[in-house]
Image: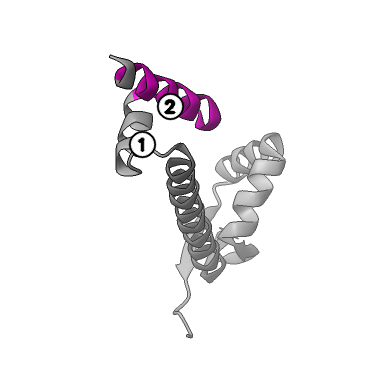
């Protein structure tokens, strides 16, 4: 009984320090042989690994976005050309302006083309 109370205290401590749910905190402590400091170290290592993966994924998407261009044409005349990342950034920073641009494009019956460049490296 005393051991169970001690384990519950450790689970509670880990939950408060990491904001994990009960089951995840318990599993992490079991993995760390019920050592709270080791469990926190494992948690932080997994968190850093996840963060690195997210950063790498975002970098890959930005590279791909820079290799893809958007061309806006009215009839056969090129009006504007820019990388997808610029378009996404602009639409996030000024969404109303982006909607206005889309509406203007629809009213003037312009065409929007996407062109992906070949990877050079």
Query: Vertically, is 8 above or below 59?
Result: above
Residue 78 is one of the magenta-drawn residues: no
Query: Vertically, is 14 above or below 78?
Result: above
Counting from the top left corner in percent of width and height, residue 109 is at 54, 47
Pick the quarter of the image with the N terminus. top left
On screen, residue 31 versus residue 64, left or right, reads: left
Instruction: Between residue 108 and residue 5, name the one nearer to us.
Output: 5
Q: Residues within 10 Å of mark 2 (few under 14, many from 20)?
A: some
Q: Which residues are magenta?
A: 4-22
| Element assignment for label 1 | loop
Residue appearing at x 36%, y 24% in the figure = 7
| Element assignment for label 2 | helix
View extreme (top): residue: 1
Counting from the top left corner in percent of width and height, residue 46 is at 43, 50
On screen, residue 108 versus residue 26, left or right, reads: right
Kindly identify which numbered label has been placed on residue 98.
none
Counting from the top left corner in percent of width and height, residue 91 is at 64, 44
Instruction: State the image quarter where residue 78 is shown.
Output: bottom right
Instruction: State the image quarter where residue 75 is shown.
Output: bottom right
On screen, residue 1 versus residue 94, left or right, reads: left
Sequence-wise first label, 2 or 1: 2
Kindly identify which numbered label has been placed on residue 34.
1
Query: Vertically, is 113 above or below 2?
Result: below
Residue appearing at x 44%, y 29% in the figure = 20
Instruction: Between residue 30 and residue 114, name the one nearer to us.
Output: 30
Q: Main secondary structure of the magenta part?
A: helix
Q: Residues within 10 Å of mark 1 (few under 14, many from 20)?
A: some
Q: CA distance from mark 2 to mark 1?
A: 8 Å
Residue appearing at x 35%, y 31% in the figure = 24
Instruction: Between residue 21 and residue 107, name the one nearer to us.
Output: 21
Q: Are marks 2 and 1 in contact (CB under 8 Å)?
A: yes
> Which residue corresponds to mark 2?
10
């Amino acid at each position: 009984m005393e051991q169970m109370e001690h384990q519950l205290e450790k689970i509670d401590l880990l939950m408060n320090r990491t904001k994990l749910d009960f089951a995840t905190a318990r599993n992490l402590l079991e993995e760390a042989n019920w050592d709270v400091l080791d469990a926190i170290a494992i948690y932080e290592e997994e968190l850093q690994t996840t963060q690195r993966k997210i950063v790498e994924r975002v970098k890959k998407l930005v590279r791909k976005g820079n290799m893809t261009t958007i061309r806006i044409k009215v009839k056969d005349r090129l009006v504007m050309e820019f990388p997808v990342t610029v378009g996404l950034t602009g639409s996030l920073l000024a969404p109303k302006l982006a909607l206005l641009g889309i509406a203007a494009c629809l009213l003037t019956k312009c065409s929007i083309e996407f062109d992906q460049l070949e990877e050079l490296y």
